[in-house]
Structures are given as structure tokens and as C-alpha cells.
């Protein structure tokens, strides 16, 4: 049974599984389009879209829309603030695991 | 006229004063509760400050581990959709076979000497350049299909991981150009080992097949160096078998499994 040991404040924008997955994926790949994220995370269009909007509203990712041939393509890239927030989040989790 | 006793209102006998005192005590306990409420990180989000980040509490190491697992999984999935292309592997294999053929032709037609060495180095420098170019172009094509960039942080990691092996091979090749008698035919085996080091480095950030190819090159390099030269096949034939054959098999497998 997991014991309550410590109250650690974590960024709630990232502290959600889909948003955490999106940020991890973007941090690993440097940037990706909607279809790639959908395939990598295995989530629905609507769900992913909602979480991407939250991340965009908080300035953690930047959206780039373009046309490839006649098809629109939306690419997402993590911002400097997003990178900092993600690194701080991972550090906080690691310290919690070490202390636990 | 009798003097009124010096008491506080709630101590007095007036019922309405007792009621006010109860209200005051209630307000004090409510204030204390609110102070505790505000100082808890969980509730910082309720403060009306738009600049303040929103926080949530992770209460257990188990929950933190679960989130780290999500991060690791998402990152692995992102790198699994690799930009390494099957066509790239096959093209690199064909270029290497062409290099082996040209080297063999060179050996037949050019006497051993400075000219032979220069042509040998020139052929393999061209093979390396064309292979890297083909790999870059095919990776770029595949990355564009997935909405990724070739020179992404992951791409830079891969380049950094591959660099030590390539630099070692370059140094040994330069040494060979000046002291060819000291290395001789062992150069091919050393190239295989250096390339294996690069592949195993890249394999740490990429799909399992890259590491498998690295181990195959490592074994082939060790066999080329340790077995007597020309025992079953000569080092040049091993070069064609590994840099040509291995890459073609690898490319076909990657194309079949991950797409071309």
C-alpha cells in the first residue's frame, strides 16, 4: 500500500496522463503533428484536441498550421516554458520517488 | 443605583450577548480553517492570481512512479515511430556493395602504391558521403510524413551517439593512409567494430533493430579480425557481406515492419 509521505506541489497542467503523454512525446521528438500524437498515445481526436488546447492556453506548446499539398497539417512544438515546466515536473517526481 | 458588574458581554446574563459571542467564536474558527486551507499547496489554485501556477498534490511515491512510467512509455513510443527508413538501409547497402566492387576493380587494375591508397581512400570517402546523404534524405522524407523534423532533439541525440564510432574510424583511416603497412587488411575489421559502436550508441535511442544490427557488425568485425585472413572469405568479401548484405536485410526488415 502506498503511504502518504510528502506533499509535493506539481504542475497540474502537466499532471494529467494525456497531457503528460503529449509533453513527453513532444520533448522526445522535438515536435510532432496531430496524427502522430494520436497514434503514439492511442487517444481519440476529441480527447487529444481538448488536452492540446489546455497546453496551448498555458503557453506550453506552440501550434503551427500549414498545408502539405492540399491537406492541412497541424504541428505542435514545446515552448521554452513548456520544456522548463516538464523538466521541473520530472525532477519533482524523481525526488519524490527517491525520498519515498 | 446599583453598579453594573464589569463583565464582557458574553459573560453577561443577556441572552442576545451570548448569541453574539457564539457567532464571534464561530468566525474565529472559520478564519483559522481558512488560513490552513490557503496555506495548503492543493488550494493555491483557488487564489485569484492569474500569474500563479496551478498546482496539484502527489501524495505517494507510488503515484509518482506511475507518472514516470507514463513519461517513459510516451517517450519510447515517440522514438519507436522512428524516422529511420527501410529504403535508406537498402540504398546504403547498395552503395557499400558498389564501394566493394570498385575497390576490387582498383586492386586488379592499379599497382600497390600511393595512387592505389589515394583511390582507395577516395572510394570509401565517397561511399561514406553518399551513405550519409542517402540516410539524411530518406530520413527527412519519412520524418515529414510523420510531421517531425529530421534535426529534432532526438535526431541530434542520434548524431551525437553515432559520432564517437565514426570519429574513431576516421582517425584509423587517416592512420592507414600514412602507415598502411601497419594495419593492412585489418582495416575492414576495425571499420566494422567502429560502425558497431556507432550503431549500438544509436540503438539506445532508437528501435531494437538498430542494436541488433550493431551486435551483428560487432560479431562480424571480431570474426574478421580474429580468424586467419582468408580462412573462409577474405576481409573484402566480409566487407561486402556486412556493409552490403547486412544493410540490405536490415532495410528490407525495417521497411516491412515500420514502413518505407
Image (spheres, rainbow, N blue to C red):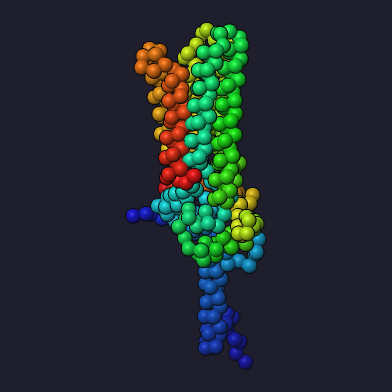
Say how many tags the image has. Answer: 0
Q: Which of B189 and B78 is in front in this view?
A: B189
Quarter where residue B189 is shown: top left
Q: Can residue B81 be seen in this view?
A: yes
Task: Identify the residue shown where x is 52% and y is 77%.
Answer: B26
Position above or below: A95 against A65: above
Residue B214, how many percent across, how many down?
44, 30
Q: Which residue lies furthest to the left in this view?
A: A1
Q: Is residue A15 visible?
A: no
Side of A17 where A80 appears, left or right: right
Side of A3 where A66 appears, left or right: right
Q: Residue furthest bottom?
A: B1
Task: Identify the residue shown where x is 63% and y is 67%.
Answer: B48
Position above or below: B211 against B191: below
Quarter where residue A53 is shown: bottom right
Position above or below: B166 against B28: above
Q: Nearer the viewer, residue A88 or B184?
A: B184
Task: Identify the residue shown where x is 43% and y is 20%.
Answer: B237
Q: In which quarter of the image is the N terminus of chain B?
A: bottom right
Residue B119, how many percent across, how many down?
60, 16
Q: Which of B141 and B113 is in front in this view?
A: B113
Residue A29, how many percent across, how many down?
55, 46
Task: Identify the residue shown where x is 46% and y is 24%.
Answer: B240
Side of A57 where B21 appears, left or right: left
Residue B106, how many percent across, how many down?
55, 16
Q: Nearer the viewer, residue B121 or A84?
A: B121
Amino acid at each position: 500500500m502506498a503511504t502518504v509521505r510528502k506533499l509535493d506541489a506539481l504542475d497540474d497542467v502537466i499532471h494529467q496522463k494525456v497531457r503528460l503523454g503529449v509533453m513527453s512525446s513532444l520533448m522526445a521528438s522535438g515536435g510532432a503533428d496531430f496524427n502522430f500524437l494520436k497514434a503514439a498515445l492511442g487517444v481519440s481526436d476529441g480527447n487529444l484536441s481538448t488536452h492540446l488546447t489546455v497546453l496551448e492556453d498555458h503557453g506550453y506548446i506552440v501550434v503551427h498550421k500549414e498545408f502539405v499539398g492540399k491537406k492541412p497539417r497541424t504541428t505542435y512544438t514545446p515552448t521554452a516554458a513548456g520544456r522548463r515546466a516538464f523538466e521541473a515536473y520530472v525532477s519533482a517526481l524523481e525526488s519524490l520517488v527517491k525520498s519515498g | 443605583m446599583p453598579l453594573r458588574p464589569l463583565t464582557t458581554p458574553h459573560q453577561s446574563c443577556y441572552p442576545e450577548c451570548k448569541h453574539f459571542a457564539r457567532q464571534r467564536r464561530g468566525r474565529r474558527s472559520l478564519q483559522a480553517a481558512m488560513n490552513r486551507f490557503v496555506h495548503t499547496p492543493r488550494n493555491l489554485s483557488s487564489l485569484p492570481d492569474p500569474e500563479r501556477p496551478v498546482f496539484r498534490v502527489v501524495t505517494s511515491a507510488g503515484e509518482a512512479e506511475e507518472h514516470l512510467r507514463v513519461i517513459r512509455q510516451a517517450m519510447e513510443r515517440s522514438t519507436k515511430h522512428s524516422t529511420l527508413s527501410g529504403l535508406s538501409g537498402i540504398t546504403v547497402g547498395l552503395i557499400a556493395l558498389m564501394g566493394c566492387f570498385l575497390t576490387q576493380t582498383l586492386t586488379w587494375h592499379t599497382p600497390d602504391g600511393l595512387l592505389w591508397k589515394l583511390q582507395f581512400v577516395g572510394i570509401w570517402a565517397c561511399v561514406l558521403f553518399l551513405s550519409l546523404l542517402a540516410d539524411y534524405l530518406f530520413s527527412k522524407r519519412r520524418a515529414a510524413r510523420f510531421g517531425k523534423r529530421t534535426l529534432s532533439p532526438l535526431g541530434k541525440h542520434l548524431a551525437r551517439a553515432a559520432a564517437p564510432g565514426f570519429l574513431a574510424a576516421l582517425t584509423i583511416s587517416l592512420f592507414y593512409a600514412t602507415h598502411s603497412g601497419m594495419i593492412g587488411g585489418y582495416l575492414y575489421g576495425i571499420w566494422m567494430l567502429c560502425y558497431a559502436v556507432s550503431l549500438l550508441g544509436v540503438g539506445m535511442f532508437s528501435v531494437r533493430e538498430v542494436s541488433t544490427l550493431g551486435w551483428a557488425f560487432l560479431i562480424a568485425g571480431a570474426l574478421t579480425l580474429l580468424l586467419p585472413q582468408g580462412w573462409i572469405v577474405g576481409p573484402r568479401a566480409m566487407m561486402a557481406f556486412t556493409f552490403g548484405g547486412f544493410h540490405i536485410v536490415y532495410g528490407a526488415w525495417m521497411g516491412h515492419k515500420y514502413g518505407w
